[in-house]
Image: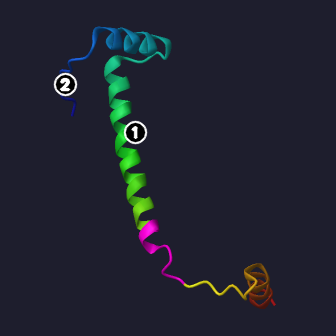
Amino acid sequence: METKLTLKLDKETIEQAKKYARQNDLSLSKMVEKYFESLNNNLDKNKNTKLVNELSGIIKINEKIDYKDERMNRLVEKYK
């Protein structure tokens, strides 16, 4: 559902936005919509990053283990 939105912006900013929109074959409405969508996408990415940051450090790493060798050994065992 589309809804009308009224914005008050600096005249020069509007002219620059119109120029950009023309150069990229977009309407101002579509340009603003895409911008808002990108903000929402970034919020979702930040949520994922926050989760990853919270989980970081939970698993203790044993520095004595060579993980590449361990992975290779497990793959060899798996495909015997």
Quarter assignment of residue 48: bottom left
Numbered label attached to residue 38? 1
Q: What kind of residue is marked 1?
A: Ser
Question: Circles 1 and 2: CB distance less than 8 Å?
Answer: no
Q: What kind of residue is marked 2?
A: Leu
Q: Is residue 57 shown in magenta?
A: yes
Where does residue 6 sit, x and y in percent of width and height?
18, 21
Asked if residue 67 lies left or right of residue 38, the reply is right
Name which residue lies at 76% across and 78% down.
68
Quarter assignment of residue 39: top left
Name which residue lies at 65% across and 87% down.
62
Quadrant location, the C terminus:
bottom right
Q: Is residue 60 shown in magenta?
A: no
Name which residue lies at 73% across and 81% down.
67
Q: Which residues are magenta?
A: 52-59
The residue that label 2 is drawn on is 5
Q: Considering depth in this image, is 12 or 40 the residue closer to the camera? A: 12
Q: Is residue 13 above or below residue 77?
A: above
- Within-10-Å neighbours for mark 1: few <14, some 14–19, many 20+: few
- In whole angstroms, how far apart are the C-alphas of marks 1 and 2? 18 Å
- Within-10-Å neighbours for mark 2: few <14, some 14–19, many 20+: few
Name which residue lies at 33% across and 35% down.
36
